[in-house]
Image: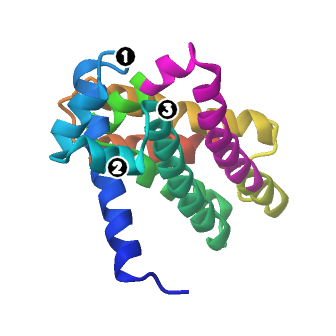
Amino acid sequence: MPRTKDDKLEAKRKREILEAAATCFVRDGFHAASMRAICKEAGLSAGAVYNYFPSKDAIIEGMAEWEREDVAELAAYLRSESNALTALVEGTRAMVAETTVEEAQLYAELIAEAGRNPTMQAKFTQSDDELKQAIQETVMRGQAGGSITSHESAETLTLLVLSIVDGVAGRIGYGNDMKPTRLADMAADAVNRLLRP
């Protein structure tokens, strides 16, 4: 069913609020970022923001949904590519290349908070589990087809891919001088070398 004009406006407004919250979380830290600061950053009244997100926890839920959408898009790509190794190499390249300094810093802030907040941890664990599953299915398909090494378990290789992506994304968060495209190429090359038979 196509979205109506109101649905599109609502989605756009939610995105604006989530982006404003992300800016505040990176700048001020999760705890110090107030709903008032988020409203100001979004350029919206408190009533407008609370209409979509009644609390910071609701904003976190919105960010977790945002992440699940990204994971679903990546999973669809991994399943659509006939060569599993190519899928993982290019998927790695895309995940790193699309990570901005701000996104990497936000991710670090949210992961730190999730370690202290079980409700928040549960929300982000769900998307992490979905990402792991999509990668592991691709690794297993590649092992069965001979394009990925069978010298390590699919679970081990999945964690290896995730560690490369997370590690490079962490470096991006430092504002590394190296261009994201160069880092993406290096991460993709590492996955290719480590996973090929």
The residue tagged with tag 3: helix, strand or loop?
helix
Q: Is residue 122 magenta?
A: yes
Tell me how far mark 3 sits from mark 2, CA to CA.
29 Å
Tell me how far mark 3 sits from mark 1, CA to CA.
11 Å
Mark closer to the chain start, 3 or 2: 3
Graded by Cα atoms within 10 Å as few (under 14), some (14 to 19) or many (20 or more), the crowding at tag 2 reads some
For residue 103, what is the image quadrant? top left
| Image position of 60 (left or right of 23) | right
Q: Residue at x 36, y 75 (%)?
A: 6
Q: Residue at x 66, y 31 (%)?
A: 122
Q: Which residue is mark 2?
A: 97
Given the image, on which type of amino acid does mark 2 rest? Ala
Q: Residue at x 56, y 30 (%)?
A: 163
Q: What main secondary structure does the magenta stretch of the protein show?
A: helix
The picture places residue 36, in percent across and down from the top left corner, at 24, 30
Label ID, residue 31: 1
Mark closer to the chain start, 3 or 1: 1
Q: In the rendered image of this protein, does residue 175 appear above or below residue 74?
A: above
| Image position of 151 (left or right of 105) | right
The picture places residue 37, in percent across and down from the top left corner, at 21, 29
**Residues shaded magenta:** 110-137
Graded by Cα atoms within 10 Å as few (under 14), some (14 to 19) or many (20 or more), the crowding at tag 3 reads few
Graded by Cα atoms within 10 Å as few (under 14), some (14 to 19) or many (20 or more), the crowding at tag 1 reads few
Who is closer to the viewer here, 19 or 147?
A: 19
Label ID, residue 57: 3
